[in-house]
Image: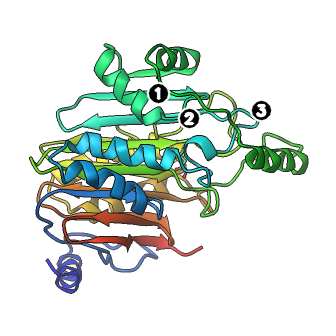
Amino acid sequence: MERRKFIQAGSLIVAAGLIKPFQGAEIPVYSFEERIEGPMIISTWIHGLEANRAGWSILENGGSALDATVAGAMQTESDVANRSVGIGGRPDRTGHVTLDACVMDGDGRSGAVGYLEGIAHPAAVAKAVMEKTPHAMLVGSGARQFALDNGFATIKTPLPEVKKDYLQWRKENKELIKRPKINHENHDTIGLIARDAQGRFGGTCTTSGWAYKMPGRLGDSPIIGAGLFVDNEVGAATATGLGEAIIRVAGSAIVVELMRGGMKPSEACKEVVMRIIRKNKDLTGLQCGFIAMDRQGNVGGFSVYNGFNFALKTQTRDEMVDTEFDRKW
Ligand code: SD4
């Protein structure tokens, strides 16, 4: 459906009282809804453009949605300029860069790694956990040993410029329990979801997590159901932002369940974001966003604050899409 028609349809649904506009929020306007044919891949944030292109080389050759999203994730994990994913990620408050990732396919198979240090491609290790172990998640030194045993490349982190920033942060934040902000500056985890030529879905989420987090902290990104959820019967969803809030509403799983119940992707993402807002009275200045796609070929997203967007790649499109949001910075 064209954007304009969809907006009108959305307004009619609201007018008919089927969806209640949330107090203080504008009437829902869906940023992008369309029945896309064939393979498609969407990824959070601007770095999603390059990631999608890496994933597309797999999709256009008949490869699986899961493999496409892992390839896209690996592209971003190698980007030395990215401060929230892979080699360029920021450390925890003790100076260690620890990486989290998960993968899931539409048949319900999944793998994850958490608190993984010094390994270049946590997304690929997560896929190996899925394929080579009976487990759903490995963390810390066990995850690292598994990666080394399976020949995954190592990296030295933090990068020198990242370490410099960290030392500066430490100087300025003597009181280390102070809550660092997840905002549009330090916020660019990548979540990728795709549908392949066979109509199968797959997804990957990878991050270095909340900059200067407490040692041992995991966010939503490696947690199936929080940072990512995929089901061939429905579609897929992935998240970015304040992981604690996303975990507490089982964010991505609920987006998929709401789509199963008939909501469009952006409606489902909005419902979960609004739930997060209702349950977190102190969310001021903290971002959370979801993106999703369904079996009908609709894609969409929604975020707490403006400025969240996702990259979309299909047979005919290669572009950024702004999501709707509840409030402005
Ligand atoms: C986390 N969701 O670890 C991640 C952080 C994030 O952009 O999305 N940063 O909570």
Q: Are marks 1 and 2 in contact (CB under 8 Å)?
A: yes
Question: How far is mark 1 from mark 3, CA to CA?
Answer: 20 Å
Q: Is residue 138 above or below residue 174?
A: above
Instruction: Please name the amino acid that badge 1 sits on.
Output: Val
Left or right position of 163 against 222 = right
Q: Secondary structure at mark 1?
A: strand
Residue drawn at (35%, 41%) of the image: 70
Residue at screen point 59% across, 53% down = 82
Residue 87 picture location, percent across and down? 60, 41
Give the mark nearest the N terminus, 1 or 2: 2
Q: Which residue is mark 3?
A: 94
Residue under label 2: 99
**Colour scheme of the picture:** rainbow
Question: Which amino acid type is shown beneath numbered disc 2?
Answer: Leu
Label 2 sits on a secondary structure element that is: strand
Q: CA distance from mark 2 to mark 3?
A: 14 Å
Residue displayed at 44% across by 43% down:
74
Residue type highlighted by circle 3: Thr
As drawn, 316 above or below 63:
below
Residue found at x 12% / y 59%: 38
Picture quarter containing residue 202? top left
